[in-house]
Image (spheres, grey):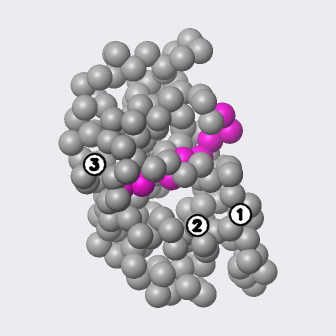
Amino acid sequence: MNSKSIIVFGSSRRNGFTGQLVDEVAQRHNLRVIDVSDYQMTPYDYDHKNRDDDFLPLMRDVAGYEQIILASPVYWYTMSTQLKVFVDRWSDLLDIEKDLGRTLRGKQGLVISTGGDIKPERCFEECFQHSFAFMGMHYGGMLYCPTDTKKDLDLSIHEDAIAAFGEKILD
């Protein structure tokens, strides 16, 4: 298993288009995939009453990688609710786990996504760019594959984009 890069995935459908794309990238590069839906995380809480849920142990694990790839379909011009909870909880790394938060500095963040538009609205990618920058991370780019109404993602038509994105993955 590639020990430098990890994919953190969030979607309402594990085997939907984005999940299929994540699995393809993970298989090609021997990457670990974490589905945030498998963890008990509640939204950010200013009083930190949720500090005993799964976020901090999960984040300690994720922070051990040099490259963090966030994966989500486009939902209403932004990331999925599942992934948004994970990213919102980065606020805990600014409040109660500052040392853990500091470990993200200098790491690289990438994005994998699918959506119904030929290309996503600029605001979609910007939310990731700004979130990574706020944590002191470098943004390395996005793999976005437009989809249609078929049940499976036709990976063959996205081969060039998948291969180009693969060159950005730290081995």
Which region shows up in magenta? 5-13
| Residue topped by disc 3 | 169
Q: Residues within 10 Å of mark 3 (few under 14, many from 20)?
A: many
Residue occupying the point 40% across, 47% down:
31
Q: Whole-percent x and y of residue 73? A: 54, 37
Residue occupying the point 39% across, 79% down:
103
**Which numbered disc, 1 or 2, marks the residue closer to the eye?**
2
Label 3 residue SS: loop
Label 2 residue SS: helix
| Residue topped by disc 2 | 58
Q: Whole-percent x and y of residue 56? A: 61, 74
Closest to the observer: 23 or 148?
Answer: 23
| Residue topped by disc 1 | 41
Residue occupying the point 65% across, 59% down:
85
Residue 8 is a magenta residue: yes
For marks 3 and 2, give the CA distance. 21 Å
Q: Residue furthest top?
A: 150
Q: Whole-percent x and y of residue 143? A: 36, 38
Residue 132 is a magenta residue: no
Q: Amino acid at mark 3?
A: Ile
Where 83 falls versus 113 (above or below)? below
Q: Is residue 13 left or right of residue 112?
A: right
